[in-house]
Image (tube, grey):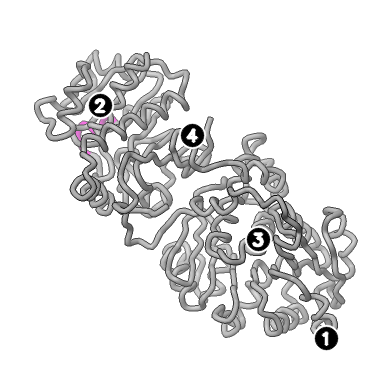
Amino acid sequence: MKILTADEMRACDRASTELYGVSSLTLMENAGQAVARFVLREFPDAQRIAVLCGRGNNGGDGFVAARALGQAGRQVKVLLLGYAAELKGDAAVMFERMGMVPVIAPDEDSLSSGPVSALLSEADLFLDAVVGTGFQPPLRGVAAALRDLICARQTPVVAVDLPSGWNADARESQVEGAFRADAVVTFTAPKPAHVFGNLTNSAHKPIVTAPIGSPEAAIRSGLGLQWTGASKKITEAPRPADSNKGKYGHVLVVAGSYGKSGAAAMASLAALRTGAGLVTAAVPQPILASVAQIAPELMTIPLQAGPQGEIHSSNLEPEILHNLVHKKSVLAIGPGMGQQPEAEKFLLGLLETTNLPTVLDADALNLISRHRDRLYGGNRLLVLTPHPGEMARLCECSTGEVQANRDQLARDFAMKYRVILVLKGWRTLVAHPDGSIAVNTTGNPGMAKGGSGDILTGMVAAMLAQYPQSPTEAVNAAVYLHGLAADFAVREQDEHTLLATDTIAHLSRAFRFRAEDEGGYLWIQGLPR
């Protein structure tokens, strides 16, 4: 799914009408109906609904939603910020069709009137349809005063298109001066604010995109941004009846050192659970027994250990290397392997002697940052999965510089070195050598625990092993599924108690989940009720 700027969204609406014959009234009707259906399904206990409408097209969407909710039996009141005579175009048409008498609030003083106070105090739910995608902050006048009143209450708020006061093109995770929201329903395609902004102030509160009739040909983006969830479709086709383990690849996990057996174990278990046909963990001999216990399905190869329990460079001997990489499909290397000189020699030697598709993580990233001339992925598929600190070392800059310009830095790096770069963090980015970036919107703060990155490494490797002809989709989907499994896991416990291995336990639910539900909503963030 493409991500559109505000200007591109306007161009999409215009093309839908002028080139493809979809009337603007139809688009508005579909948008308002989509909001109403979402409210009826996700907020079934909200019987008294206050619809807060501005004078523009966002207010027009609100008029449609108010009519639909009233027809569904909800008690609906509409607050209009202005006078009905000021409405124009499609919004004026939908106001007439609404068939309700609104409470009028043309200025700040009117918000303290009895009718407005009653409307706000009696509501079980607010629909925020004050301003939408075309708005340029900040809110002023009566809209800003209403925002303060709404933010002071605990009543849930569903935002129509965007929480009023957000700039649709904003890349910041937080902004000042906007309405709060407990859910957001946008239309046709997400905008940058939907994927980069913390619109609902919680990873668990939903942001959904609803189709409203714009043809796919009208949806054009120049950002080079897409959404990781769209790649999950590669996992949704059933496996052929004549499947066998050989069809789904053999992942080699090279990881671990003395005291860090868990990293190798978690990466290996994640690769197994994500669907690889076979997984072999190659680890130093002293931790072999510990890693092997993670699952009876896991195969192991003992590696000679250095003086600190790290992988020794003597494992580069031709016979050992041949046995190590023979008949393997994908190499995942780095978790817990340490950064001792012997581990460094082994890593560089292994990368020189094999062209297997490779996932580099953790210690492997820190070691390779000293040898950026070895990073070029033009001769093989190379995936890097750094967190911001590791990315700073790869780029020879500060972590702050990484965080200040994540998407451009990730894009430039992926294109320069011809790699797939998974830059982890809030809204993990997957940058590809062609300059495209997929933005991930699953996951939650419970993942801020040791082991989460090791699990992602195993998942990425397993997806590449199963879908070797679609590496872009494979990596995007792995990142999306990783966060989605954590979202399911945290539903059953608290973010404080979530462990990385709990994510693995919920992978089945993540694989079965369809981002596009029966109502046509794409769940950009959060899960259905």
Name the amino acid, label 4: Glu
Q: Does the magenta stretch include residue 302?
A: no
Region in magenta: 140-146
Nearer the camera: disc 2 or disc 3: 3
Q: Do the residues labelled 3 and 1 touch (CB within 8 Å)?
A: no
Q: In this view, does 453 lie to the left or right of 44?
A: right
Q: Could you tell me how far apart the alpha carbons at marks 2 and 1 are, in whole angstroms?
A: 73 Å
Task: Residue under label 3, please give it.
Answer: 466
- Pointer 1 local density, CA inside 10 Å: few below 14, some 14–19, many at least 20: few
Percent x, y for residue 332? 69, 68
- What secondary structure is found at the residue carrying circle 4? loop
Residue closer to the observer: 458 or 117:
458
Q: Do the residues labelled 4 and 1 touch (CB within 8 Å)?
A: no
Q: Could you tell me how far apart the alpha carbons at marks 2 and 3 are, in whole angstroms?
A: 48 Å
Most common SS among magenta residues = helix
Nearer the camera: disc 4 or disc 1: 4
Task: Residue under label 2, please give it.
Answer: 63
Nearer the camera: disc 4 or disc 2: 4
- Residue 136 can be seen in this image: no
Q: Which residue is drawn at 71% across and 64% down?
A: 249
Q: Is residue 84 left or right of residue 352?
A: left
Q: In which quarter of the view is residue 97 placed?
A: top left
Task: Residue under label 1, please give it.
Answer: 317
Q: Is residue 143 magenta?
A: yes
Name the amino acid, label 2: Phe
Q: Are marks 2 and 3 in contact (CB under 8 Å)?
A: no
Q: Which residue is drawn at 34% across and 36% down?
A: 179
Q: Residue 56 carries which label?
A: none
- What secondary structure is found at the residue carrying circle 3? helix
Counting residues from the start of the chain, the first of labels 2 and 1 encountered is 2
Residue closer to the observer: 276 or 192:
276
